[in-house]
């Protein structure tokens, strides 16, 4: 997984030191790789409050684990810290989108905590997501490129074409 190092608003952009990605731990083991686009407060809260200690083992179904273990934990953290928006109709949202890698699968978590998995086995969220998806689609056709090289080249392409994406980036890997 890769992310640029830019945080920006309508009138300002700044490079940030911390990656927009982190490992989430299950009983002390890094089981999830999480990327966050949007509100930095959401990123901060989830990064430092996402470790799960449980007597239950993770299942072999990554979708089940995210829906039943990780997302409830994230909703709880955001509610407790005021970074969770509740509406009159009972819907709730966060001011961010997430990508979660777990057991070789990639999932997107939408603002309303809806979870999806594409057939492509790659995803992007954030300012440059459309350009990134196109770049990844083309780069994955070159079987000589490693996943890390595809991410690196994608970030270079996106930073060239999208104002809110920096040339500086981070890459984190998990699993096989």
Image (spheres, rainbow, N blue to C red):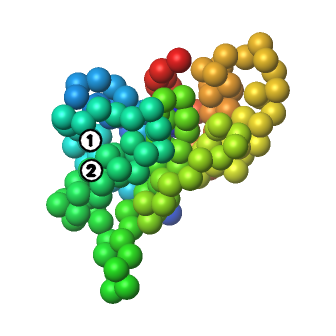
Write down the residue under mark 1: 50
Residue 8 place in picture, x, y as percent: 47, 53
Q: Are marks 2 and 1 in contact (CB under 8 Å)?
A: yes
Write down the residue under mark 2: 73
Spatial CA span between label 2 and label 1 = 7 Å
Q: Residues within 10 Å of mark 2 (few under 14, many from 20)?
A: some
Q: Residue at x 37, y 29 (%)?
A: 31
Image position of 4 (left or right of 57): right
Q: Residue at x 33, y 46 (%)?
A: 70
Q: Quadrant of residue 152?
A: top right
Closest to the observer, 3 or 140: 140
Q: Quadrant of residue 23?
A: top left
Question: Relative to 49, does residue 148 appear above or below in the rendering?
Answer: above
Residue 117 place in picture, x, y as percent: 59, 47
Residue 148 place in picture, x, y as percent: 60, 20
Q: Residues within 10 Å of mark 1 (few under 14, many from 20)?
A: many
């Amino acid at each position: 997984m890769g992310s640029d190092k830019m945080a920006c608003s309508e009138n300002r952009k700044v490079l940030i030191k911390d990656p927009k990605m982190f490992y989430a731990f299950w009983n002390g083991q890094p089981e999830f790789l999480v990327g966050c686009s949007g509100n930095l407060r959401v990123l901060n809260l989830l990064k430092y409050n996402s470790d799960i200690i449980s007597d239950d083992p993770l299942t072999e179904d990554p979708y089940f684990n995210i829906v039943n273990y990780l997302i409830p934990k994230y909703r709880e953290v955001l509610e407790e810290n005021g970074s969770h928006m509740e509406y009159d109709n009972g819907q709730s949202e966060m001011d961010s989108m997430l990508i979660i890698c777990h057991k070789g699968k990639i999932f997107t978590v939408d603002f309303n905590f809806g979870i999806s998995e594409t057939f492509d086995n790659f995803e992007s969220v954030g300012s440059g997501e459309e350009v990134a998806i196109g770049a990844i689609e083309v780069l994955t056709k070159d079987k000589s490129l490693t996943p890390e090289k595809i991410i690196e080249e994608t970030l270079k392409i996106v930073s060239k074409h999208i104002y809110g994406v920096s040339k500086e980036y981070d890459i984190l890997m998990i699993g096989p």
